[in-house]
Amino acid sequence: MTLPDPADLGMKDGKAVAILPPLVRLGITLMVPKGLDTDRLGTVTAKVPRKGAMDDAARAKARAAIFPVTV
């Protein structure tokens, strides 16, 4: 199996700190786009409703990490 390196992570609120150590042990560099607002795509608490199912939101967040919008 080939592991991605680097890997983009579409999360905010410091969650990358928890995810980083196991990825480093696998030899994966973690990239977190600066200023990425994944909450705009829906929140767990539904404060911002998701468009579609949970997996649709997860895919949208992954795409946002890979292809960040620049303004």
Image (cartoon, helix red, strand yellow):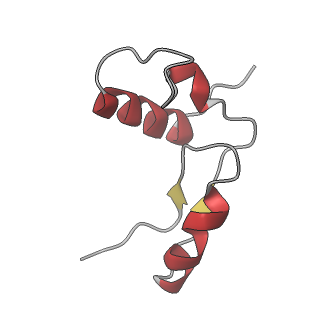
Most extreme residue toward the bottom is 25
Between 18 and 8, the one nearer to me in the picture:
18
Most extreme residue toward the front is 45
> Which quadrant would the N terminus be assigned to in this image?
bottom left
Residue located at (51% from left, 85% from top): 25
The answer to which image quadrant residue 29 occupies is bottom right
Between 48 and 41, the one nearer to me in the picture:
48
- Total residue callouts: 0
Determine whether 64 is above or below 2 in the image: above
Residue located at (74% from left, 42% from top): 34
Most extreme residue toward the left is 1
Relative to residue 59, is residue 62 drawn left or right? right
Relative to residue 22, is residue 16 drawn left or right? right
Residue located at (54% from left, 51% from top): 9
Query: What x and y, as percent, mark residue 65?
Result: 55, 40
Query: What x and y, as percent, mark residue 50?
Result: 42, 18
Relative to residue 36, is residue 51 drawn left or right? left
Query: What x and y, as percent, mark residue 69?
Result: 63, 25
Query: What x and y, as percent, mark residue 64?
Result: 52, 33
> Which quadrant would the C terminus be assigned to in this image?
top right
Determine whether 11 is above or below 52 in the image: below
